[in-house]
Image (tube, helix red, strand yellow):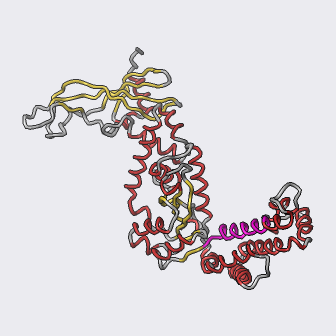
Amino acid sequence: MPQPTSPPAQIVADTIIRTVELGVRITDAALDGDTTVLWCELLTDGPGVCPGCGLVGVYRDTVERRVTDVPVVGHPLQLRVRVPRYRCVHDGCVREVFAHDSRRLARPGWTTTRRCAAYVLGRLAVDKATVSAVARELGRSWDTVNSIAVTATEQLLLTAGPARLDGVRVIGVDEHKWAHVFGADGDGFVTVITDLTAVVAGHGPARLLDLVAGRSAAAMTTWLNARDQAFRDGVRIVAMDGFGGYKNAATTALPDAVTVMDPFHVVALAGHKLDLCRQRVQQDTLGHRGRTGDPLYRERRTLRTRLGLLTDKQRTRLEAVFAGDQHVAVEVTWWAYQQIIAAYATTDRRRGKTELASVIDRLRGELPAGLAELATLGRTLHRRREDVLAYFDHRASNGPTEAINGRLEALRRNALGFRNLINYRIRSLLHCGALAL
């Protein structure tokens, strides 16, 4: 057993550990393996009051309450707090024995201090640590730390309430694969809904608003209908990919909002058609899939490179590939792909909109035989013409939503996967929801 600390040392220890804010005072300290143990007394201003009848009790004995606090110099810290107990002498009270109020130290029934929850949230949300890493720091189990994080985040969401959605004018929506196991909620997919208002205004990042199980019009419609009318009336722009379900949901639930198909997905769609055309021509001309040394296969990455970024060597190789008549379809599809990129890259919005509209009109018109991929692209862009061209008027891109998707992928990898969608939603909101800690 260690020697009792002297009064000056107690003051120094209390100041360093800041135990006063927990309502306790350090009386002794020792090491228990890797854990620092502090014995403390509960700071009281008199006898305890019975929670049943409200009368002052008579001192009975003292019990020790053990709670985990924030780590000290990288080591787990346990507080062993002496808590007085009292007898209730009121004849009409059902309580016989009660402990002194220690809610300042920790919530009733909890084995961690109040500030421990704030520490867990900070490590997970700000430092992007894993639950396992925080559990090691605290010397507690994964389940305990995860429960703290879920409960504290739910409390943050409850405290923020509907006000968390105030001022949302631009939202982004996209699908996200959260689980890769059979039978997962929503077939392992969720609909990601983000706030892009600050991004479009140019004064802040995107933030995650919510995750909804499934990737369908019903998933998005259900979420929007669950919001109040003031929120739905405030949303002016919805940025999305080419999935028609999200378009239908936005049109139904937000009839006054402008839907925007963002450039990333338009260019990605055109690039996908270019790949399909290259693969088809490869099969038609050589009778097999691309192999090392095949002209088209060798230039597959060069074909997806923006025209202005091509080196002289790459240009020479492309010219050699396009010189063959058998590759005409690839050349025409490639040129349409480059024109779409160039339209988005134009600094003059009006000019860019006119150029992209011309590309859509040409692709929708009569195309020569052998350009099936371009014909399909033309039909898609024509069907979503207003959404595609709306980007030039509002500059709302779903790129920030894709960025949040990437952060969620990193979260899932660091956690070695999730099996519970409720936990995944809570952790995602803590990770990317810009909650006020």
Considering every residue shown, the one lying at the far front of the view is: 287
Q: Is 291 on the left-hand or right-hand side of 222?
A: right
Residue 139, position in %: x, y?
47, 30
Residue 77 on the magenta segment: no
| Predominant secondary structure, magenta span | helix
Work out whether 162 lies above or below 75.
below
Residue 67, position in %: x, y?
38, 32
Stretch of the chain drawn in magenta:
261-279
Query: Where is the N terminus found, in terms of image quarters?
Result: top left
Q: Is 19 on the left-hand or right-hand side of 171?
A: left
Residue 184, position in %: x, y?
50, 52
Instruction: Tell me if I can see residue 48 in this picture.
Output: yes
Q: Name the residue located 69 percent from the left edge and 66 percent from the top edge.
A: 268
Seen from the viewer's position, the closer of residues 117 and 11 is: 117
Report which quarter residue 128 is drawn in: top right
Residue 262 on the magenta segment: yes
Q: Name the residue located 22 percent from the left edge and 24 percent from the top edge.
A: 61
Seen from the viewer's position, the closer of residues 409 and 61 is: 409
- Total count of labels: 0
